[in-house]
Image (cartoon, grey):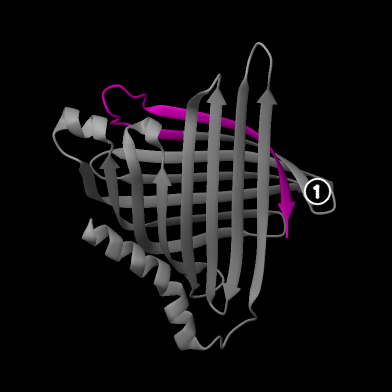
Amino acid sequence: MKKMLTAMAVVMAAPFAAQAGADFVEGDKTFAGEAELGATLTTGNTETSSVKGRLNMLQELGNWENQYLFEGLYKEDTGEVTAKRYYGGIQGDYKFDDKNYMYITGNYEVDPFTGYDYKAVASAGYGHKFIDSGNMFLSAEIGPGYIYKKLDDEQTAILGYDNEDSVVAHGAMNFTYEFSETSKFTQLFVADYGDSLEGRSESAITANIVGALAMKFAVIVRYNDSPLDDKESTDTETNMTLLYAF
């Protein structure tokens, strides 16, 4: 646990410490972001509610490109909670040139329906932009990392231990294609391979409605090839949300 906390602290501090040393000698400071919100509510014979929120912020500080991502999902069916997931992540990319960069990333996820109280991942490595044209973008990253998972009380009682951790190989791919000035397709793959293989895929189509307001349709798939005994290996999530760019 101490190793994980130390790694996360280094990950979160590195972009700011390095940029402070550089004194912002290159480029201008820029900041942009996207906020998403989707919700459903039914009453009467069936009472259900669900809320999905997401905040994605991007920042340029000289040679650093930083991303801050926060997500939340909550679903309730007839008074029973059927889904609850919270996620926070940060990544700093240090650009060597227009194509090559070093990344440092860390994330923290709470999803009690997986049998874990929380999961934390930290990684650092090399990234490359294969395509960065007017309407298409493709990048990939690879590097070593560390994963720590805290089991909930029920699983701890069954298994006889309360955490799992391992060194992992971390990989990611990010693809964007703009169909027009008002619509685009995005695809994200993230995988961590250590004692088990865990991955996440997010496919999304975004279309502008008016001004900075857009509609987003996304399908998210989470995979774990070694789930706990009473859990599924694959989780899927389909969302329709409103997106506001700022």
Q: Residue furthest right?
A: 210
The residue lying at 63 percent from left, 49 percent from top is 176
57 relative to 243, above or below: below
The residue lying at 35 percent from left, 44 percent from top is 118
Looking at numbered disc 1 in the image, what kind of residue is underneath it?
Thr
Give whichever of 115, 97 is nearer the camera: 115
10 drawn magenta: no
Counting the numbered discs, the total is: 1
Give whichever of 3, 63 is nearer the camera: 3
Q: Quadrant of the N terminus?
A: bottom left
The residue lying at 67 percent from left, 43 percent from top is 37
138 relative to 225, above or below: below
Q: Quadrant of the C terminus?
A: bottom right
The residue lying at 67 percent from left, 38 percent from top is 38
182 relative to 113, above or below: below
Residue 191 picture quarter: top left
Residue 186 picture quarter: top right
164 relative to 12, above or below: above
Q: Which residue is mark 1?
A: 182
In the image, taking residue 142 as reference, residue 238 lies left or right, namely right
Q: Position of residue 208 (x, y in %)?
A: 80, 46
Residue 30 picture quarter: bottom right
Q: Is residue 224 visible?
A: no
Q: Secondary structure at mark 1?
A: loop
236 drawn magenta: yes
Q: Position of residue 35 (x, y in %)?
A: 67, 52
Q: Residue furthest left?
A: 160
Task: Sort mark 1 into few (<14), some (14-19) or many (20+) by Cα contacts within 10 Å.
Answer: few
Q: Position of residue 187 (x, y in %)?
A: 58, 43
**What segment carries the magenta color?**
222-246
Q: Is residue 171 visible?
A: yes
